[in-house]
Image (spheres, helix red, strand yellow):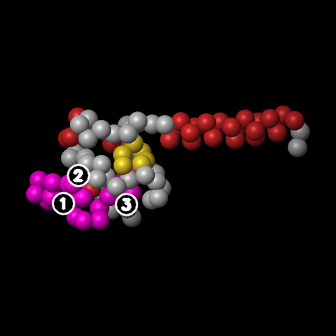
Amino acid sequence: MNNTRRTFFLTLAAGGSLLASAAHGQAKLDEKDPQAVALGYVADATKTDSKKYTKYAAGQVCTNCALYQGKASDAAGGCPLFGAKQVAGKGWCSAWAKKG
């Protein structure tokens, strides 16, 4: 492998690591955030107001939602509904959709 290709691949690997670490540094979603309030987001799904959100069922959490962008084992991950903020893996909101 020539030096230019080696430099390219090392730069690519370093950039990927930087992006991954930046993603882990994202702010967590606050339950009082206007978007969170509008969707009934709670960081702990067991605290969901099941009378207000009748769609909620025990066992529904962000990690098993189709919108969750983290791994099932992650404590928090991205959600396109909340921009750059991370939702709790054990959280829930009214937009929850079963992962297919």
> Is mark 3 in CB contact (under 8 Å) with mark 1?
no
Q: Residues within 10 Å of mark 3 (few under 14, many from 20)?
A: many
Q: Which mark is residue 88?
A: none
Q: Nearer the viewer, residue 24 or 78?
A: 24
Query: Which is more N-terminal, label 1 or label 3?
Result: 1
Q: Is residue 66 visible?
A: no
Is 81 placed left or right of 69 in the picture? Answer: left
Query: Which is more N-terminal, label 1 or label 2?
Result: 1
In which quadrant of the rendered view does residue 21 lie? top right
What's the CA distance linking mark 3 and mark 1? 15 Å
What's the CA distance linking mark 2 and mark 1? 7 Å
Q: Residue at x 63, y 40 (%)?
A: 17
Provide the residue designation for mark 2.
94
What's the CA distance linking mark 2 and mark 3? 14 Å
> Is mark 2 in CB contact (under 8 Å) with mark 1?
yes
Is 51 placed left or right of 82 in the picture? Answer: left
Magenta range is 46-69
Q: Is residue 99 visible?
A: yes
The three-letter code of the residue at mark 2 reads: Ser
State the image coordinates of residue 22 (x, y, percent, origin top left): 53, 36
- Mark 3 residue element: helix
Q: Nearer the viewer, residue 70 or 31?
A: 31
The three-letter code of the residue at mark 1 reads: Lys
Provide the residue designation for mark 3.
64
State the image coordinates of residue 5 (x, y, percent, origin top left): 82, 38
Provide the residue designation for mark 1.
55
Quadrant where the N terminus lies? top right
